Image: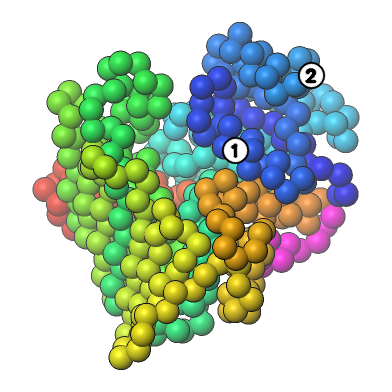
Amino acid sequence: METKLRMGMVGGGPGAFIGEVHRKAARMDGGIEIVAGAFDIDPKKSRQMGAALCLDPQRVYADFNAMIETERALPENERIDFVSICTPNNWHFPIAKAFLEAGIHVMCEKPMTLTVAEALELKQLVQKTRKVFGLMHTYTAYPMVKLARDMVRQGDLGAIRKVIVQYPQGWLARAIEKDGQQQASWRTDPRQSGAAGCMGDIGTHAANLAEYVTGLTIKEVAADLTAFIKGRKLDDDGSCLLRFNKGAKGVLHASQVSIGQENNLAIWVHGENASLEWHQEHPNHLTVDTINAPTQIWKRGNEYVGKKSPAAARSTRIPAGHPEGFLEAFANNYCNFADTIRAKANKEKASELATDFPGVNEGVAGMKFIDAVVKSSKANAAWTKI
């Protein structure tokens, strides 16, 4: 496959933040072109978005079912190669299921589904259809996160003892959903968001980051969830104790009512020989400490980073000192996802670097984490297996 991949999108209509992020990121490296979409549940808004993107009006659809039917009828060299799902959570499963059954690769926003049962069904469908499925856990795609993962893999830290991960925000410190704020309205609605609010929205990012960097699996949680805003049906703050396999312990804190916090995702990993620290708001640096030695600051874009971590080098576009961040991380996942699709189309085995993006297994893990956290909190922070 030598031409650009043709991308369709469901969701991401006028005023939707994440849809525009996906579109910008997918196009960043020049290998993907958006050609079709069902951008909003309101057909008029879908057409409005399609016009803003200068798409062929015949390929701007009123709903995702019409999109599947029409795209499948097109010649193979014209129809979409994959769909990007950028809807509220309750639509992820039915849309992903429909496109997979239609033989179309899928990139999906997280969390993957509303329930564990749906996640397991989707995993079976991905295995059955053999289609490429990507899940947009953005933060594991930062170069310095990949460096951190590779340091752990290569044994630099020794056995992992303690993992601290946080994700505080402050944007839901007031009941802005009552004022019609679009992003707040669906995220605080259990019918659209699922069983968890803050923990489903950003706590899953923190859990995914912890597992990715350490290579460990969260086995048990003891969680305390709170809805501080009166009348809010889903949690807006939560804390969890974590038990990983291989004996490691951890703490996870996520909040959307922490005034002054913007997007302060951060992780500390402590091993028997060294520790590392990474902050999403300062993503181009990784801090490493060893016993009785000065603190090291590893900086993205330098040759020594690439020698240590080919994955970090692959994820770097510009020289050191020029910041890379959020959009580039999205683009890294799209780049690897697209290269895996190309390898499959050419009947080749995708490289380990190309397949380094979150998929259906991470989606299942995320839903099991949400389920366990909610159950634990309802049981007064009782230890709950995942």
Q: Is residue 181 magenta?
A: no
Q: Residue at x 51, y 82 (%)?
A: 154
Residue 184 picture quarter = top left
Q: Which mark is residue 22?
A: 1
SS at mark 1 in the image: helix
Q: Is residue 59 left or right of residue 214?
A: right
Span of residues in magenta: 346-359
Q: Position of residue 132 (x, y in %)?
A: 66, 48
Q: Residue at x 55, y 67 (%)?
A: 300
Quarter of the C terminus within the rendering: bottom left
SS at mark 2 in the image: loop
The amino acid pointed to by label 1 is His
Q: Which mark is residue 56?
A: 2
The front one of 309 and 341 is 309
Give the vertical position of 297 relative to 377 (above or below).
below
Q: Is residue 271 left or right of residue 381?
A: right
Q: Position of residue 349 (x, y in %)?
A: 76, 63
Residue 374 picture quarter = top left
The amino acid pointed to by label 2 is Asp
